[in-house]
Image: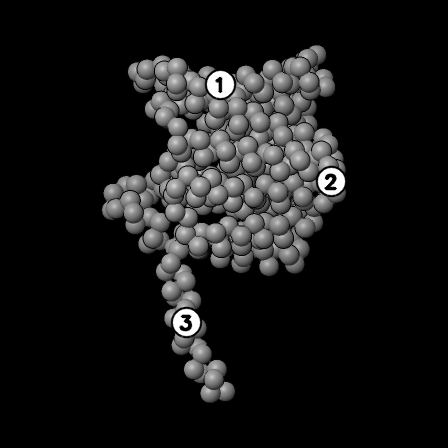
Amino acid sequence: MPSIFNRFGADNASWRLALALLIVYLVWGTTYFALAVAMQTLPPVLMNGARFIAAGLAMLAIARWRGLAWPTAAQWRASALIGGLMAFAAMALVVLAQQAGIGSGLMATVVTTMPMWLALWTRWGGERVPLTSWLGLVLGAAGAALLALEGDFSTTLLGTLCAFGAPLAWSLGSYASRKLALPPPAMASAAQWLLGGLLCTLAALLFEPGARGFQWAQVSVASALAWLYLVVMGTMVTLNAYLWLLKNTSAALAGSYSFVNPVVALAVGVGFGGERLTGWVFVALPLIGAALALILYGRPVVDAAGALWRRLAPSQART
């Protein structure tokens, strides 16, 4: 069993961790496709604002049904910071980067810097980040960058600044959720998403072209179903799983979704969008696999590689 799981003992936390990772890897990989469909007839920023408000209201209903108390003033402030960074700033910056002219390939590559930022905040906060985790994050980002080579790498200064700001904001919100005092998970999610969604909606109504006069009747059935998928699976299920990972595992492992998701997105594109595989895929996948091995297994991978090299070295010397 991977060393990252061993710290949780023999109880059910091991399979909970594995399930949370699987959800984050698979579901968020499919949201690339869902977002593209939703934005066909929905303004992007307004769509995200409505998404988080709907998910937040649903989580609030669940939290109150379970008898959870309302957040304290300090918990509301912490939730506002996290929701503002993750649900509002990170999402809005991605849209602004695309509107400012950044290419899809460069955007996909920049997003993979998120777990490196998160690991950096974690290290500066006093937590130890193993060298194998750093190596895994670099390999994972390299693999994801290779997957994005078929995309557009054009950019502008404003687009570049917004693109790098998005993973930076998400990583800061992720780190804050690890450190700040929050209410129980269901109420914390409700508060964060509601406040972030309200900020997103306000920004859309003030600044997004077409949002103020938008008519919901013009939304297509496909976009509506995609939006509903983003609310339920992309937010209520998967974002909750990610927030749980941030509290219960290493920063590197929680952030590893950023270079696994493009693999899933590629599979969805091949299966549903008629995309073609290129030779870069067969270089990128081993890199991403090695990255996950380093992050999951840590020192045992290095020890095994060293033992294999020591076994092979004498035979190579004889030849």
Q: Secondary structure at mark 1?
A: helix
> What is the crowding at mark 1: few (fewer than 14 residues within 10 Å), some, or many (at least 20)?
many
Which amino acid lies under the numbered mark 3 shown in the image of this protein? Leu
Q: Measured along the vertical axis of the image, is residue 219 above or below residue 104? A: above
Identity, as a three-letter code, of the amino acid under mark 2: Thr
Q: Amino acid at mark 1?
A: Leu
Q: Give the secondary structure at mark 2.
A: loop
Of labels 1 and 2, earlier in sequence is 2
Residue visible at 41% across and 69% down in the picture? 306
Are the residues at dot 2 and dot 3 in contact (C-beta closer than 8 Å)? Answer: no
Q: Can residue 241 be seen in this snapshot? A: no
Q: Given contact means CB atoms under 8 Å apart, are the residues at marks 1 and 2 in contact? A: no
Of the pair 275 and 204, the residue shown nearer to us: 204
Between 316 and 186, which is closer to the camera in this rendering? 316
Give the labeled residue for mark 1. Answer: 194
Residue 190 screen position, x and y as percent: 43, 20
- The residue labelled by disc 2 is 155
Q: Earlier in the sequence, mark 2 or mark 3?
A: 2
